[in-house]
Amino acid sequence: SGDPGQAVIYNLSITNTNALSDAFNILVTSGWVVEAPFSIGPFEPYGNDSLVVTVTIPITAPTNTLDVALVRIVSQNPAVLPITATLNTTAKAMYGMSVDAVFFQQSALPGETITYTLQITNTGRIADTYDISVTYSWDTHNSTPVGPLAVGESTGLAVVVTLPTSAVIGMSDTATVA
């Protein structure tokens, strides 16, 4: 399995079980892009080597989509029966989130509260729920978790900051959202 857009590499071991030197043609069928040599060998009798097959998961592949690549290995000796290897490749879920705010900076008097509204957007490819934490040295409150949000869906998250009564004019603090 892999992420959409990722290449998954399979290493197959090929052994010539014949008493004669042999080479093999490689035929691949798949719904996704596959890279493999057209042939491998020649092999000495009972010799072996690796066959590298690369399956690229499309960037648009939905979560948990399965592709079955059939790798048919055909001896150039017509007396030898072909064999087929089955490679199952699954697209993993892609998770993502963006956070934006209308106002990144606000002012208030000591003891007052400020509310920041953060826009949380699911940029992944699967519905998701997010645990949002806000680290701030002043008293801060926010609701968590956020979601579940469908793919592309956004919602607002209110972060309420109470300025300490001991704050002086010009004092500031910075919050970290994770």
Image (cartoon, rainbow, N blue to C red):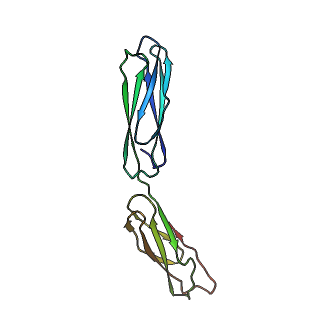
Whether 64 is drawn above or below 115: the answer is: above
| The one of 108 and 33 positioned closer to us in this rendering | 33
Whether 60 is drawn above or below 156: the answer is: above
Q: Residue at x 51, y 87 (%)?
A: 112
Q: Residue at x 46, y 13 (%)?
A: 45
Q: Residue at x 44, y 15 (%)?
A: 46
| The one of 140 and 114 positioned closer to us in this rendering | 114
| The one of 36 and 89 positioned closer to us in this rendering | 36
**Could you tell me residue 5's position as x and y percent?**
48, 48
**Could you tell me residue 145's position as x and y percent?**
39, 68
Whether 174 is drawn above or below 67: the answer is: below
Q: Residue furthest top?
A: 19
Q: Residue 15, located in which quarter of the rendered image?
A: top left
Q: Residue furthest right?
A: 170
Q: Residue 74, located in which quarter of the rendered image?
A: top left
**Could you tell me residue 158's position as x and y percent?**
45, 77
Whether 60 is drawn above or below 153: the answer is: above
Instruction: Give the quarter of the figure containing the N terminus.
Output: top left
